[in-house]
Every structure is written in structure tokens, then in C-alpha cells.
Image (cartoon, coloured by chain):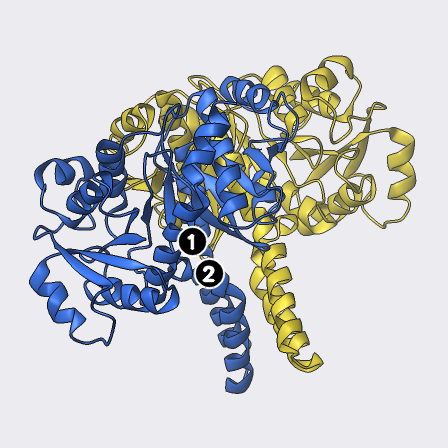
Chain colours: A yellow, B blue
């Protein structure tokens, strides 16, 4: 199996994608990597590692899409960027998946434009991980689609169920609709209609409230991209805020250095699972291919995990299962 | 000045409202209290306290509105409930304000129905406190109005500015619009229009993202009631979740009892300001009167603070300032 890796994406390219690729082939036998990006840059970076040269190839893509570049313009104008070249290689069947820690908006736009949508899918989405006290859970949509039609929520629930079960390994994943109250008649007219649509799913557990998310009262949380994006970024800000608040309290209480170090240690260990850099990456669900995006700050280990995750998606036939689920 | 207090609202009536009232008159000289609720119940509770009996009177209201009762039905059918009787007394000028730790929905509905709206106000709202690392900040709307018109955001910004400045004591409070990105062209069509409307306010600082809320990048956060309610309940769930996570980590790390107690102490002190029970209460902004609601679990101290807060609103002439601001 060949997985293409964006060697010119994220905050630490080419080092982290290249090192992640080298670590991935050491981890998984039959895996081959296609590193996509400026050839000279990749060649030079590869010289720092010892690896089986038959299992890593380079696909030249001289143009760079910056992290904060306008997605649509970037994809339209930079036909020789790693994102466009890599996804075209995937489309042509030269690789089974494409992974990147680059510009999320550009990746989403290019994935939809180049790979197209799966049969029956209204809108592709990014299935984002949301940290909870039970570990990472899925939140859809987290910003790809700010407003959703009622029937799109249903598709997101179906796609999220398959991904949670087959890739995240959650047995019998449950679905909750984020709303202002538990009762079916709560929320906007749209959400009331969505609730009725979702009732046909056996794993729909009804409305969930803001307080249920951190507790992971369900495994999959559905909302529109506006709510999801705000919640996700709010959630991401919690670890740093908690550290700041505890640090301030310890200063006020004049706790000794030993205690302070211990508290910081406990805190770091507690918040470890909230760190998005440790998560491999998240898939664009609903596109006709396997395309994953990682945090811009992805470490080599994060890139490696993203590659293995993508391979897992291919092996598990996630897309075939999605198409079958939507046609049932 | 007479403040009416709902003696049959919240999870701990009549004790907490009555005790809070007794503490409030001890705290503030010229204050008189009208305790509204079942007379026999209040009379019996008052026997537990020593107080100036000329400064606390009882207004009989035999019916009880439960915390989870449907607001509109409760207000329509229970004409002799403390909420309806107390707000009617306020309307007739028998008291300068009404405060309650009771059913929020019923209070909002009754406040709008009985007191009416201030001249020029589209929609009254609940100005909720949101905990940040800089202390409590205002979030509007937090669930009273799930969907808002563009011009309503502008009014909320104006009302929130006056309340933040004159009651919370924040000098030159700033306003942020919660959105998915900082740029004016981010978000839904509605939010783009709202951004353009808000530009006329000198204290509008533009869009803020989910990650800016905990950091209190502005003093007032604007959003529709759907987003606000989800965020508020999510925020409320953080302290318990953090305690759970740290507790689990300490168990795994087998830390000694002494360290554990110290960590819990630091945590409690850090999260103290996040506890909504310590906050006095929040006002319904835009109604033609002073009506405040507190957490159902309000302690006597919380009820006392809510009473003093209401007196402060009356003295500061918040409503006159709102009307003047809307007509500028």
C-alpha cells in the first residue's frame, strides 16, 4: 500500500513529515510512502535518516501553499503545490491515500474538487476529535459547513458512526445532537426537524447539552460548523487557561517549589490527551478517497500516526461502508 | 428602597431566600425587603432569625412554580405564584426590583409579559456571566433568544456595555462577536451583516473565536442564544471535569495523601470564581423594570448579593441609560 505524505505542509516541514514517514515504514511492513513537495528539499532532509530507500519515493511539487493562504485561491492558482499534486496522484490511483498537516481549508477544497464526493453524499465534512474525560470523541461538523440542511446531519451521523466504530474502535458508538435541552421539542425549528430525522438511526440517543460534551455522554456529537468550530476552539483553549489559573493560585498561596513541580507534573499528565499534536489527524468524510489532515504543529509521531490511520481507513474500507450505509 | 425577593424559588426555599434577605438588610441601610411566597412558610422561616421586623414584610403568594415546569403554562395558570405576584407588585410600584432563584424560563416570560419592554428594545435578553481567567465577563444571549436578527445584536451590545460599565465596574468595556474567524468576511451571511452593523459602536473590537473567550479578549461576548446556551453549559461543566481528570491522574500516579489534599486545595481555590452559586444573579436586560434571576442552587450569600445587585441597578439608573443609548 502506498500512502502519499505532504512534505511541504504544517509548521515544521520538511522535517516532521519526512521523519514521520520514515518512522511509519519502520512500524508497518507492507507500507510504501510517496513524499510530495519540492524535490531538492525532501532529498536533503532524507539524508538525515537511515531507511529502506525502495519504500520511500519522491513526487516533485515545487509550489508551497501557506498555512493562512485563502483556500480557494491557493488551490486554483497553485497547480504544482503538494496538496494539488498529491491529491491528483491519489485520484489517478498512484497512492491509496493522501495525508497532510497543511492548510485545512485548502485541503478540504482540493479534496472535494479533485476527489469528488462519494455516491449519495450531500456534503463532505471533517470529522474532528473532541477531547472528553473518556478520551477523544467525534464532533461533526467542526467548521467545514457553517450551516447544514436537516438531511445532512443524518448523513454526518452515519459517516461518524462508521468511522468511530471501524477506525476509533468504539463498540456500538452512540450519536447525540447538540442542542439547548434534552426534549425533542427543544431548539430552533431546524433542530426540531433534525431530531425527527435522526430518530430513524438505532444509535441516536437524542439531544445533548453543552454540559454533556466533556462527559462524553455520547460518542458522536452533531452540530453545524458554526457551533462546532466555536466549541472546538474553546475546548482547545482550556488546557492553557487551566495551567494559567492554577499557576496564579499557587503564586498567591506561595506554595513551595517541590509542590509546584508536582502539580505541574500531574497537570501535564492529565491534559496530555487534550493535546491535539498527539492526535494523528482527522479524515475528510464523504470524499471519494482517503484524505486526512493533521494539526499544523504535528510532531513526527503525529505524522506517523496519521499515516497509519490513513492506511487503516483504506484497509477497513471505510468509504465502501459509508456508501452502503447511505443507500440502506 | 424596597426589593421584592422570591421566597418560593430555587432549590433551597424558603431558607436561602429568607436568610439572604435578612443578611441583605444588615448589609445595606435604607433597604426594605418584600418576601413573596406562601405566607405561613415564610413566617415560620423568619422565626429562625433576628432582624428589624419593620424592614421585612411578607406578600402572600400561595402557588409554587416548579423549577422544571413549562414557563408559559406556569405563568398563564399560576396567577398566585411568587413570580407573578412579585412582578405585579413591581409593576404597580410597590417595590423597585424583583429577584428570584426560581425557574428562569418562567421568570423571563413573566418579566416580559408583566413589565413589558423598554422603549426601543426589540428583544429582552438575559445577560449571563461567563467565567474567564480575568473573572466573570458578559455573554449575551445565553438561551433566551435562540435566533437573533442583525439589529438585535447591536442592541445587546449596547445594553451589555452599560451593564458591564455601571454594575460590573469594568472601565471602557469592549465588545466581541463570537465567530469562526477574526476577519469581517468570516462566518454565515447573518454574522457578516452583524459585523457591519456593530462597526458603528466605538467599543466593538471585531470577531472573536472560541479560543478568545476563556482569555477574555473582550469584556462582552455576543452570540445567538443557541451558541450561547451551548457554550455556557459547556463552560459550567469544566470545573467538575477537571477535578475528575486530575483525581484520576493522581490515582494512577499513586501520589500521597498530603500532596493530593494540597492539589485539591489549589484546585478549589482556582475554580472558586467559576462557581455560579457565588455569583449574585443576572439581570433581564431590556425589560421595563429590574428583574434578576439567580442560580437554582443559590446560597444565602448568593441571594444577598443578588438583592444588592438589584439595588445597584436601580440606583445606577441602568434602564434609563439603556433607553438613552438606544435613542442615540
Chain name for mark 2: B
Element type where label 1 sits in the image: helix
Chain name for mark 1: B
3D distance between C-alphas at marks 2 and 1: 7 Å
Q: Quadrant of residue A295?
A: top right
Within 10 Å of disc 1 (Cα), the crowding (few <14, some 14-19, many 20+) is some
Element type where label 2 sits in the image: helix
Q: Position of residue B80 (x, y in %)?
A: 9, 45
Within 10 Å of disc 2 (Cα), the crowding (few <14, some 14-19, many 20+) is some
Residue at 25% from the left image edge and 73% from the top image edge: B51
Q: Position of residue B79 (x, y in %)?
A: 10, 41
Q: Is residue A274 above or below residue A114?
A: below
Q: Nearer the viewer, residue A120 or B4?
A: B4
Q: Position of residue B317 (x, y in %)?
A: 43, 41
Q: Quadrant of residue A56?
A: top right
Q: Quadrant of residue A195?
A: top left
- Tell me, yes or no, whether the two marked residues, 2 and 1, touch with CB atoms within 8 Å: yes
Asked whether residue A317 is in view, the answer is no
Residue A118: mark in rendering: none
Lateral position of residue A24 relative to residue B119, left or right: right
Residue at 16% from the left image edge and 70% from the top image edge: B45
Task: Tell me, yes or no, whether dots 2 and 1 are on the same chain.
Answer: yes
View extreme (top): residue: A76
Q: Position of residue A47 (x, y in %)?
A: 91, 45
Q: Nearer the viewer, residue B289 or A268?
A: B289
Q: Nearer the viewer, residue B123 or A306?
A: B123
Residue at 20% from the left image edge and 68% from the top image edge: B53
Residue matched to label 1: B236
Residue B239: mark in rendering: 2
Amino acid at each position: 500500500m502506498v500512502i502519499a505524505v505532504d512534505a511541504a505542509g504544517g509548521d515544521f516541514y520538511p522535517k516532521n513529515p519526512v521523519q514521520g514517514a520514515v518512522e511509519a515504514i519502520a512500524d508497518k511492513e507492507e507500507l510504501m510512502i510517496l513524499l510530495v513537495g519540492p524535490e531538492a528539499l525532501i532529498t536533503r532532509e532524507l539524508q538525515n535518516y537511515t531507511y529502506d530507500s525502495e519504500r520511500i519515493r519522491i513526487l516533485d511539487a515545487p509550489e508551497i501553499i501557506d498555512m493562512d493562504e485563502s483556500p480557494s485561491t491557493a488551490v486554483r492558482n497553485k497547480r504544482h503545490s503538494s496538496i494539488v499534486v498529491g491529491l491528483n496522484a491519489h485520484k489517478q490511483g498512484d497512492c491509496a491515500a493522501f495525508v497532510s498537516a497543511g492548510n485545512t481549508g485548502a485541503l478540504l477544497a482540493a479534496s472535494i474538487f479533485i476527489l469528488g464526493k462519494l455516491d449519495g453524499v450531500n456534503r463532505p465534512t471533517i470529522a474532528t476529535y473532541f477531547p472528553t474525560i473518556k478520551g477523544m470523541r467525534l464532533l461533526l461538523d467542526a467548521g467545514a459547513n457553517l450551516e447544514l440542511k436537516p438531511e445532512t446531519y443524518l448523513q454526518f451521523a452515519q459517516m461518524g458512526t462508521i468511522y468511530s466504530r471501524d477506525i476509533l474502535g468504539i463498540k456500538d458508538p452512540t450519536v447525540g445532537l447538540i442542542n439547548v435541552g434534552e426534549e425533542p421539542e427543544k431548539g430552533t425549528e431546524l433542530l426540531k426537524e433534525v431530531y425527527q430525522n435522526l430518530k430513524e438511526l438505532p444509535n441516536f440517543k437524542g439531544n445533548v447539552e453543552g454540559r454533556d460534551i466533556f462527559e462524553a455522554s455520547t460518542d458522536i456529537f452533531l452540530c453545524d460548523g458554526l457551533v462546532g468550530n466555536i466549541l472546538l476552539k474553546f475546548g482547545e483553549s482550556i488546557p492553557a487557561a487551566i495551567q494559567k489559573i492554577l499557576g496564579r493560585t499557587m503564586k498567591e498561596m506561595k506554595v513551595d517549589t517541590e509542590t509546584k513541580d508536582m502539580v505541574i507534573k500531574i497537570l501535564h499528565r492529565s491534559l496530555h490527551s487534550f493535546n491535539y499534536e498527539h492526535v494523528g489527524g482527522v479524515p475528510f468524510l464523504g470524499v471519494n478517497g482517503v484524505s486526512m489532515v493533521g494539526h499544523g504543529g504535528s510532531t513526527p509521531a503525529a505524522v506517523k500516526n496519521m499515516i497509519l490511520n490513513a492506511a487503516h481507513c483504506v484497509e477497513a474500507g471505510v468509504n465502501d461502508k459509508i456508501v452502503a450505509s447511505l443507500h440502506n
